[in-house]
């Protein structure tokens, strides 16, 4: 995955207790976001909600197809194990003295 500068906000999607990100959503200088796919590079620009939804759908599909040896109930339960983390950013407050 590519390195980002200190002004970029990064949301990482994780599965279960893993600290390794499955996919990342990276902010753009225009206020929009891109999905940083692990195998395809960057996506087109979109808003944050749309990027997070697409990344989550991709990750869920990936988990379902990779864990085919597990029974259906266990695979469906694994869909509840996704969580987002975000990079720390200092927010500028306009109008502060």
Image: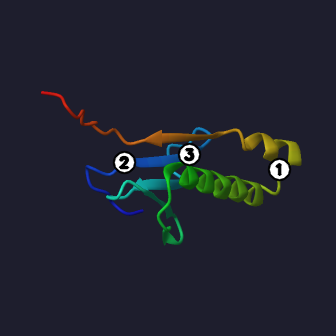
- Marks 3 and 2 sit apart, C-alpha to C-alpha, by 16 Å
Residue sitting farthest toward the bottom: 40
Instruction: Evaluate if marks 3 and 2 touch, with contact meaning CB atoms under 8 Å apart.
Output: no
Please tell me how many numbered marks the rendered image carries: 3
Image quadrant occupied by the C terminus: top left
Instruction: Evaluate if marks 1 and 2 touch, with contact meaning CB atoms under 8 Å apart.
Output: no
Q: Which residue is mark 2?
A: 9
Residue sitting farthest toward the top: 97
Residue 40 vs 26, above or below: the answer is below
**Residue nearer the viewer, 52 or 68:** 52
Q: Position of residue 7 (x, y in %)?
A: 27, 50
- Marks 1 and 3 sit apart, C-alpha to C-alpha, by 20 Å
| Secondary element at image label 1 | loop
Of mark 3 and mark 2, the one earlier in the sequence is 2
Q: Position of residue 6 (x, y in %)?
A: 25, 50
- Report crowding for label 2: few under 14, some 14 to 19, many 20 or more residues within 10 A (C-alpha): some
Of mark 1 and mark 2, the one earlier in the sequence is 2
Q: Residue at x 78, y 40 (%)?
A: 77
| Secondary element at image label 2 | loop
Q: Position of residue 94 (x, y in %)?
A: 22, 35
Image quadrant occupied by the N terminus: bottom left
Q: Which residue is mark 1?
A: 70
- Marks 1 and 2 sit apart, C-alpha to C-alpha, by 36 Å
Q: Which numbered disc covers residue 14? A: 3
Image-based side of 89 in relation to 78, left or right: left
The answer to whether residue 13 is visible is yes
Q: Nearer the viewer, mark 1 or mark 2?
A: 2
């Amino acid at each position: 995955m590519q390195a980002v500068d200190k002004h970029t906000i990064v949301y990482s999607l994780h599965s279960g207790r893993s600290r390794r990100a499955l996919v990342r959503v990276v902010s753009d200088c225009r206020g929009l976001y891109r999905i940083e796919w692990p195998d395809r590079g960057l996506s087109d620009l979109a808003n944050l909600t749309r990027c997070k939804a697409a990344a989550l759908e991709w990750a869920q599909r990936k988990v379902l197809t990779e864990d085919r040896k597990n029974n259906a109930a266990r695979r469906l339960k694994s869909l509840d194990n996704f969580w987002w983390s975000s990079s720390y950013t200092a927010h500028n407050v306009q109008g502060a003295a």
